[in-house]
Image (cartoon, helix red, strand yellow):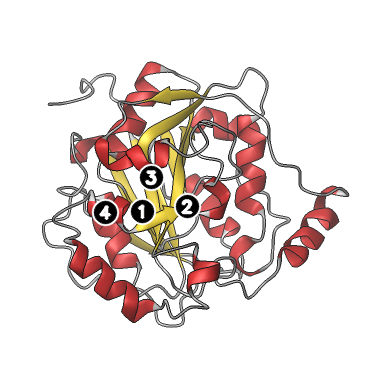
Amino acid sequence: MRLFSRKRRPFLSVIICINNMAREAPRTILSACRPYQQNVSSEDYEVIVVDNGSAVPFTLRNSAGLSPAPRIVSMPDPQPSPVFALNWAARHVAKGTHILFAIDGARIFSDQLIANMLKAHSMCADAFVYTLGCHLGPSVQMVSTTQGYNEAVEDRLIADSGWPSKPSALYDISVFAGSSTNGFWNPIVESNAFSLPRHLLDAIGGYHTGFISPGGGLANLEIFARYVQRPDAKNVCLLSDMTFHQVHGGIATSGKVQFSTFDAEYRSIFQRGYVQPSFEAIYLGPLRPEAAKFARIGLL
């Protein structure tokens, strides 16, 4: 079933940024494409993977059967921070009237994420659509990696879960990321898969280029706060669709860099500290059974 007619169908550009993610990126890319993505036509969107200066340029060894065929592009002038690669891809590579940003290429998408983002945009012209984030494993990875959780353990966990043949399995083997611990019903601080119309991006801007530190520091939190608190904001939270972070020694999730470092960069840009956003959201459901355990968090 098509969500959109040919004449009026939005075209979503999914931009995924990677850096030295030969293990993690193939899973993320698979999850962004059909047949994993459900209830959507491959004509409705494109998948762009931006390699931001990997030591060994990323190549997708097996893309057979993936649709739309993912486009692997290299950032011409890679920087330690991903913000430049994401902005460049949105301006110079993406064809879509709507843009989805995934700043961390290690995050697997839930299987109806694309369809529901398109549905949200079809219902609300100026929507900022966002998802909540999870970490694979028994606890947030800043903790679990100090208790023996690593890539090998995670590979076994994913394989034993039945994923990708069983997309719902990821919900069973993950917990909310720290940025989403407030749950669906309260304001969160960032989303690792959010989308917006290009005209809104042109008006409000992309990632702030003051964030030059490796990993981007608080860049993803800043852009999220800027959009959800814009005047007359229409924020749509996908009630069951989420992203699932694979462990990879990332700047933030590894715990190697403390918040004080991120805070110092933020203060150097804005001359004030970061403040968690306060905003209201509209919810797009229904709530699927696999996400029920997450929906109960924050209700009391």
**Quadrant of image for the C terminus:** top right
The image quarter in which residue 245 lies: bottom left
Q: Which residue is mark 1?
A: 48
Q: For residue 89, which numbered disc appears in the image?
A: 2
Camera-nearest residue between 245 and 234? 245
Which of marks 2 and 4 precedes in the sequence?
4
Crowding near the residue tagged with mark 3, few <14, some 14–19, many ≥20 C-alpha atoms within 10 Å: many
CA gap, disc 3 to disc 4?
12 Å
- Residue 183 — which label? none
Q: Amino acid at mark 3?
A: Met
Front disc: 4 or 2: 4
Q: Is residue 201 above or below residue 170?
A: above
Closer to the chain start, of discs 1 and 4, is 4
Q: Is residue 259 above or below residue 220?
A: below
Q: Residues within 10 Å of mark 2 (few under 14, many from 20)?
A: many
The mark that comes first in sequence, 3 or 4, is: 4
| Label 1 Cα neighbours within 10 Å, binned few <14 / some 14-19 / many ≥20 | many
- Circle 2 sits in a helix, a strand or a loop, which is it? helix
Which secondary structure, mark 3? strand
